[in-house]
């Protein structure tokens, strides 16, 4: 068992809202809105950056943990769009938070980044290298939405979340985990320049970054990509369960990267977890990338679905494509 305690959570969501009525005005058919299950999303202001969002979420997490930035030893950041390409956004967070004793590094597994970040934190804590670790995630999808593809666009929300991770007491922490990758679906979803993923950001400067996804996967058509989206995450979950010698019925709460209704409806039967054990937030926030996992964890704690001693599964999927599951005994 790896020692890991979630000592504090923080979320920050921009004030600006887009609602169902706004989506309809943008040309999204009402039946599509209903099918995706996203009725509202938050949108950043033009001058809000990843660091702006993450600093606010981080301060909330620190407050909830009863800590100051000066208590943090390590900052792990997983932001969708950092301030600069190739330069760790976590370094800027360290400076802006005043976490002067902390070193910092970035982690990227797209929407699934929370899983490797938590495991890296658990291993550092286990080794005694760091005692208090701040993990931050953010996305501002709206800045890279494709105006020519509004149906893929409206489900994507902006926001940030953070968690403070520390050493758990004996008998609590990470019971098991599993991570799997299939790079064969690398080009089915991502962020590209203009209309082609063949353009490279370092040699093309007059094209806008745009998010895209193979719409067969969204619509549920029987494509290979669609089948992968539906089956890979539950399979990963069951592998982690097996490593822990647990059954689906033993999981008190499953915190999954539940981002849109069609995927959630496919995942739940395959995971064999009843809907009442899975907190979701996509109805009011949409798919907020890696932030969604922590938003759902926050929802589960707020609603009393996650309690000390519970077996909690944290499950996420990220473009590229990777899946990861952590089974925890919650402190």
Image (spheres, rainbow, N blue to C red):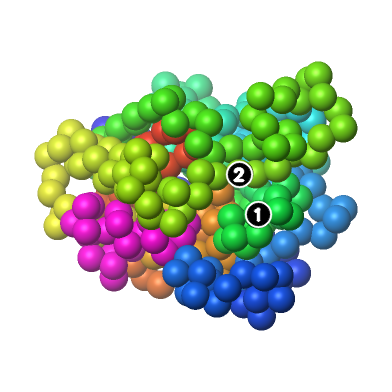
Q: Main secondary structure of the magenta part?
A: helix
**From this viewpoint, which residue is outermost toward the bottom?**
21
The reply to whether discs 1 and 2 touch (Cβ–Cβ < 8 Å) is: yes
Left or right: 89 as drawn, with respect to 132 = right
Q: Is residue 87 left or right of residue 47?
A: left
Residue 275 at least partly seen: yes
Q: Residue at x 14, y 57 (%)?
A: 249
- Looking at the picture, tell me which residue is in the foreground, 18 or 211: 211
Residue in view at x 79 percent, y 30 percent: 84
Residue 103 can be seen in this image: no
Q: Is residue 141 left or right of residue 315?
A: right
Residue closer to the observer: 79 or 12: 79
> Is 49 or 287 nearer to us in this picture?
287
**Residue behind mark 2:** 212
| Disc 1: which residue | 149
Which contiguous range is marked in magenta?
258-278
Mark 1 lies on a secondary structure that is: loop
Q: In the rendered view of the protein, which quadrant contains the N terminus?
A: top left
């Amino acid at each position: 068992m790896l020692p890991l305690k979630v000592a504090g959570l923080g979320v920050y969501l921009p004030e600006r809202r887009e609602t169902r009525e706004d989506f309809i005005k943008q040309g999204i058919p009402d039946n599509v809105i209903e099918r995706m299950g996203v009725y509202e999303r938050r949108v950043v202001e033009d001058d809000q950056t990843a660091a702006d969002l993450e600093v606010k979420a981080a301060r909330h997490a620190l407050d909830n943990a009863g800590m100051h930035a000066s208590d943090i030893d390590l900052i792990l950041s997983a932001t969708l769009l950092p301030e600069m390409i190739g330069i760790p956004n976590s370094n800027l967070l360290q400076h802006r938070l005043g976490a002067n004793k902390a070193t910092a590094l970035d982690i990227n597994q797209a929407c699934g980044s929370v899983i490797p970040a938590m495991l890296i934190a658990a291993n550092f804590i286990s080794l005694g290298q760091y005692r208090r670790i701040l993990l931050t995630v953010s996305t501002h999808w709206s800045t890279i939405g494709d105006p020519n593809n509004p149906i893929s666009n409206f489900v994507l929300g902006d926001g940030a979340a953070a968690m403070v991770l520390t050493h758990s007491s004996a008998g609590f922490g990470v019971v098991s985990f599993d991570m799997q990758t299939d790079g064969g679906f690398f080009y089915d979803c991502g962020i590209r320049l203009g209309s082609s993923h063949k353009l490279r950001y370092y040699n093309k400067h007059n094209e806008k970054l745009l998010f895209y996804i193979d719409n067969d996967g969204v619509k549920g058509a029987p494509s290979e990509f669609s089948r992968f989206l539906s089956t890979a995450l539950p399979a990963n979950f069951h592998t982690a369960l097996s490593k822990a010698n647990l059954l689906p019925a033993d999981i008190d709460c499953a915190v999954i990267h539940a981002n849109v209704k069609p995927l959630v409806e496919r995942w739940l039967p395959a995971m064999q977890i009843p809907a009442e054990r899975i907190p979701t937030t996509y109805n009011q926030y949409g798919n907020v990338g890696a932030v969604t996992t922590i938003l759902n964890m926050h929802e589960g704690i707020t609603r009393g679905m996650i309690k000390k001693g519970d077996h909690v599964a944290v499950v996420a999927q990220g473009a590229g494509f990777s899946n990861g599951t952590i089974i925890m005994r919650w402190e």
